[in-house]
Image (cartoon, grey):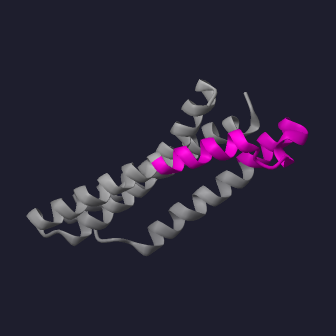
Amino acid sequence: MSFREKSAWAMIFILFSAGAYYFNKIIGISHALGETAPPIISLVISYVILIVIASIIIMAAIAGTSGREANQPADERDRLIIDKAGHWSGYILAAGALAGIFNYSVLHDGNLLFHIVFASLMLSQIGEYVFQIILYRRGV
């Protein structure tokens, strides 16, 4: 498995774990309030900090085991895979944003709109790494 594929697997794990942490907190707060929790900036900041710290630690460990491969720039195949995965993950983001807007037009809940769009952003990033792994495995 290449360094880029290992890092994609690691980022899927990190993003999924951080997203589960975030939405576990939001669901708990929503149940306590009896309505959708408002966006909480400190929770969003802790989500971002969790991702950054976990990424640094895990990527350093992967880079330490990969040697020179970690320092090499992306070749043509890597750039093509990254571009395709980013393109496809954009559809996930667009679908989530449209779902949030549709939901807002029906329920008029701005807090839920924020959380749906934020979730689609999370899923889009996870999807990008999933697509990268699929394309690496297919040999694109």
Q: Residue at x 59, y 58 (%)?
A: 50
Where's residue 123, x and y in %?
A: 42, 49
The picture places residue 43, in percent across and down from the top left corner, at 45, 67
Residue at the image position 79 percent from the left and 43 percent from the top: 61
User: Is residue 138 left or right of 3 when viewed as pictured?
Assistant: left
**To which quarter of the image does residue 98 belong?**
bottom left
Q: Is residue 138 left or right of residue 60?
A: left
Q: How many marks?
A: 0
**Left or right of residue 97, residue 77 in this image:** right
From the top left corner, tell me how far across and down residue 96 is, in percent.
Answer: 31, 54
Q: Residue at x 53, y 65 (%)?
A: 46
**Considering depth in this image, is 138 or 61 the residue closer to the camera?**
138
In the image, residue 137 above or below residue 19: above
Main secondary structure of the magenta stretch = helix
Q: Could you say which is closer to the camera, residue 83 or residue 108?
A: 83
Location of the C terminus (image quadrant): top right
Magenta residues, start to end: 58-87
Residue 96 shows in the view = yes
Q: Quadrant of residue 66?
A: top right
Where does the image place residue 109, in percent across and percent down from the top left? 17, 68
